[in-house]
Amino acid sequence: MGVTLKDVAEKAGVSTSAVSRTFTEGASVSAKTRAKVERAAKALGYSPNALASSLTTGRTKLIGLVSNNFHNPLFLEVFDRFTRGLQDRGLRPLLVNLTPQETDPEATIRMLRQYSVDGAIVASSTLPPTYSEAFRAAGIPVVNSFGRFSTAPQVHVVGIDNVACGRMAAEALIARGYRRVAFLGGPENATSTQDRALGFLAALREHPEIDVSVSYARAYSFDAGRVEMTKQLMQGRAEAYFCGDDVLSIGALSAVQEAGLRCPEDVGIIGLNDMEMSSWQNINLTTIRQPVAEIIGASIDLVVDTVESPARHPETRLFPCRVIERGTLRPVTEPRQT
Amino acid sequence: MGVTLKDVAEKAGVSTSAVSRTFTEGASVSAKTRAKVERAAKALGYSPNALASSLTTGRTKLIGLVSNNFHNPLFLEVFDRFTRGLQDRGLRPLLVNLTPQETDPEATIRMLRQYSVDGAIVASSTLPPTYSEAFRAAGIPVVNSFGRFSTAPQVHVVGIDNVACGRMAAEALIARGYRRVAFLGGPENATSTQDRALGFLAALREHPEIDVSVSYARAYSFDAGRVEMTKQLMQGRAEAYFCGDDVLSIGALSAVQEAGLRCPEDVGIIGLNDMEMSSWQNINLTTIRQPVAEIIGASIDLVVDTVESPARHPETRLFPCRVIERGTLRPVTEPRQT
DNA sequence: TGATTCATTGCAACCGGTTGCAATTCGCGC
DNA sequence: GCGCGAATTGCAACCGGTTGCAATGAATCA
């Protein structure tokens, strides 16, 4: 089935080296042989075997795309952008779907090794930093997208400052005059949730007059948000909630509506992510927008650069978020504080 | 960086063949050498290079997963199941993200060839059959998931009977006593839309007393659905709509609510897919469920089988759909007709 | 004990390319 | 026509494995 280098060489009446060289950038071939080879290649329908060449060049142009977020709608956009971004640079995404319980990187590393990926992107807001660090230790250039900020990162991290986002959410609620607020987080062991809670609570410590409470949903999911919000509404302690992410928020929103309450009149909600559905007019969720495109662009840049120079010092790139004003928080009551 | 077969062989004091054989199923190796090799391999942290071995075996265990549906939330579930299903069989998904305008398979085929994929799955409800047929012609075992039914298929097709679904939707509306119904399709050139319209209209031809109209949204998207439904509501001709898919339906639903109308009291809507969001209580869309898990399971089975026996005759596997009763259609008025 | 069989093992060629090196060819000036 | 350096080309080894084949060794049977 496959047309090989040798076939082309034969047909063109040249050596295999000549053929190989016409297909490699910047190699020394005369215009004449190049023409002969190209003619023969076209006639035979030849295209070089990327895997065979990777044996000698050491580059497969394969990038492992590792994620455990196959249930968060935001990640459809994430996968879309990652795959497209990689393709645009001539790279190929090898997708790895981690189960939520899977926290041991060894199996994945072994697999990525077997396929000699040039690098890997770990796209997850819940995996601990040690996960990606194991990749680096195994010699695989890696970027942790949507990962946790660190002042002394062991691997490249691209994402948002979750602590700052928590703070931003708190300030948004304060600015709208809410006096009893709550954090309704994702799973307590997710790094993103931990950081968001941290920032949220820190900001509110500066406002002792405001009542704060904290609870955690068992997952970043609609149902978990709905269940947890239902529980919270029974206690009725808070006027407004900062929810772990948008899916959770929409679940919470659903619980509010179901309880016969109105949003934002009775209960305010602010989410985080700004996934596509949040802007749907019949959801209309006020939320904090995460600049997904920028994060992914930077992640790809970084992994490509690291493949070129593996000794590159690990760095953290955080992108600013901003509040997207929609319908689940009442308007700002006083001049907005920056 | 990489530990090779030779390193292990040296350390274990055996030939490279011996090492290779301990790592291949059913090869002849004595327990003694196997032990020696395994000890050495473990000590060195060796794992065989899948790409190198593919050179001789002709199997990469790579499966091209080709799709142009990176904006339909259903496909997050689709990718989740595909990747997991492939992984469970020791296969690796190489993801290809087609732009909606991209209808020429050549570039993708060339790329999949370069990576010597064992097979490919084309997951799309909008691409024409000729797309996957080109894969087959190029010698790549292929399955078209969510594809169009054909009595004389040129490639394996797994999916639903869109014509039957259109009919099912029509019957659902009739059974609920709607007298003026409409089909609000996806893009007119999508095969799935064409077939759904066909079935819908065919069923209604048997009910000349019922008024039917047809229109098409410009895409399978929320906005397109909202825009088209807004347009339709101005004319106010129909009482109930069969929308091209769930995203479209939710957009339409939003338009209904925005127009100050209630669903299902004033306007009924039935979708198709039953994606996760449709069951969210604050959406609560009545829809026709597509058995995604079964479709994907069958697709993987089929592609694997075809890799084993490429001469396998192309076949079509269609899975039955069923109406999921939720809140956007009024209840059945007369004994439900099967 | 000797003949025979069968499992195990290593050699070496091969999978489809790449690349260092030496040989060849070319263009050019004289 | 000759000499020279530079450009082009092919040879052959190599990338990391697999596998047919023949050689080896152990086990079985008479």
Image: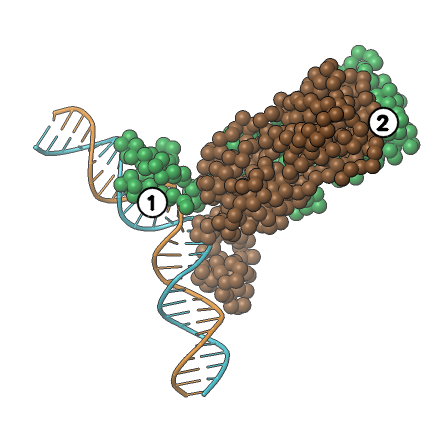
Chain colours: A green, B brown, C orange, D cyan
Q: In this figure, which residue is indicated by the disc labeled 2?
A: A257
Q: Is residue A96 left or right of residue A51?
A: right
State the residue in front, B158 or A335. B158
Query: Do callouts 2 and 1 mark residues in contact (Cβ within 8 Å)?
Result: no
Amino acid bearing label 1: Lys
Q: In this figure, which residue is indicated by the disc labeled 1?
A: A6
Residue A230 lies in quadrant: top right
Amino acid bearing label 2: Gln
State the residue in front, A301 or A243. A243
Per the image, label 2 sits on a secondary structure element best described as helix
Question: Residue at image x 78%, y 32%?
Answer: B175
Q: Earlier in the sequence, mark 2 or mark 1?
A: 1
- Image coordinates of residue B216 in percent, x first then y, are 64, 23
Q: Is residue D17 above or below residue A141?
A: below
Question: Residue at image x 51%, y 49%?
Answer: B312
- Image coordinates of residue A270 in percent, x first then y, are 78, 25
Per the image, label 1 sits on a secondary structure element best described as helix
- For residue A278, say whether it is visible: no
Asked whether the residues under marks 2 and 1 belong to the same chain, the reply is yes
- Image coordinates of residue B139 in percent, x first then y, are 46, 43
Q: Chain of mark 1?
A: A
Q: Is residue A19 left or right of residue B236?
A: left
